[in-house]
Image (cartoon, rainbow, N blue to C red):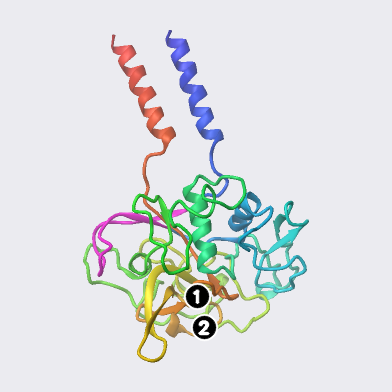
Amino acid sequence: MKTTTALAFVLFALSCASSAHSVTFDWATVGRAGGVHSEKYAYRVSKHEVTNNQYTEFLNAVADTDTNSLYRCTATCSNTLYGITRSGSSGSYMYAVKSDSIGNGPGGTDYTYGNKPVVSVDFFDAMRFTNWLENGQPTGAQGAGTTEAGVYNIGTGLDEVRNPNARFFIPREDEWIKAAYHKNDGSGGNQWDYPTSSDSVPNNNLPSADTGNSANHANSNSSYPLTDVGAYTQSESPYGTFDQGGNVWEWNETLIPFGCGFGEVCYHRGIRGGSWQDGTFNLAVSTRRHRFAENGPSDQGFRVASIPEPTTCTLALAALCLAMSRRRSR
């Protein structure tokens, strides 16, 4: 009996391991203490912006036909900022990360695309990617079980509201700000001016000359300007996130009001952090920006957040362990 139970334990563990999802994240845990707004609870933010490697996995899972135009470039796209190619025809599209651009990186290095942030993503793309994560990274046509529901029921770009039980989501502005600027010292009002754990303006050194207060901004290399996510290894936020200043703008979930004429108030979705082509003003905690939800220019990316909870495998494995323990105690 003991042998049978042990074998069941091993087989179950292997089955859980084999079901691991292909897109994974390094997470920074943002604790309950501190924060200057309403985000006084524990959550996780991805340490890095979503990459071309990760978004390519997403496209290959749900965009054989690409009903909702999740791919933002044609197969012959020459834009060096966009790092994904598409081949085939509708119904059998296939996606791949672009080949290296030899000698075009900083200092004559090779410019590789896999770990660059995906760009030209609008807010709909970010919501659909997050829905896909929430739904378990399924393969299939774009629909309610893959991209159109789960965290956000896709609508106008302004009427989507986060499912309160969601495990994955696009961070709200408060959540994004805390991960980027809060000093992580247990005090509510303490923030750095910049997401490099500094009140001094970051320099724009290359990653190889990272001073601990460096970011990819004010970059004059307009053809190959992006840096690998996390390349500035010395310039993380107090919670351990990277590139929340510079590289690409990042979506947040918050609706930002603005005047749109004749006394009317309209709304956009929030963006934060500046990009490779922006000055330091846009990297500061005080700078708030917004865009139309359907606007996904070449300097726009995103990162995701999560509320961790035990997985089905974890819970079932715990139950199996308990059963084994009870059996041994008899």
* Image-quadrant location for residue 174: bottom left
User: Going by the image, does 155 lie left or right of 163?
Assistant: right
- Amino acid marked by disc 1: Gly
Q: Nearer the viewer, residue 264 or 83?
A: 264
Residue 40 drawn at (x, y percent) = 25, 60
The residue positioned 35% from the left and 81% from the top of the image is 286
Element type at marker 1?
Answer: loop
| Residue 49 visible, this orientation | no
* Image-quadrant location for residue 228: bottom right
Vertical arrangement, residue 221 with respect to residue 180, above or below: below
Residue 259 drawn at (x, y percent) = 38, 87
| Residue 30 visible, this orientation | yes
**What stretch of residues is rendered in magenta?**
26-45
Q: Which mark is residue 278?
A: 2
- Amino acid marked by disc 2: Asp
**Disc 2 + disc 1, Cβ < 8 Å:** yes
Magenta span includes 118 = no
Quadrant holding the N terminus: top left
Q: Disc 2 to disc 1, how far (Cα)?
A: 7 Å
From the image, tell me which residue sits under label 1.
246
User: Going by the image, does 48 lie left or right of 62?
Assistant: left
Mark 1 surroundings within 10 Å by alpha-carbon count, few (fewer than 14), some (14 through 19), many (20 or more): many
Element type at marker 2?
Answer: loop
Q: Quick one: label 2 or label 1, which is nearer the N terminus?
A: 1
Mark 2 surroundings within 10 Å by alpha-carbon count, few (fewer than 14), some (14 through 19), many (20 or more): many
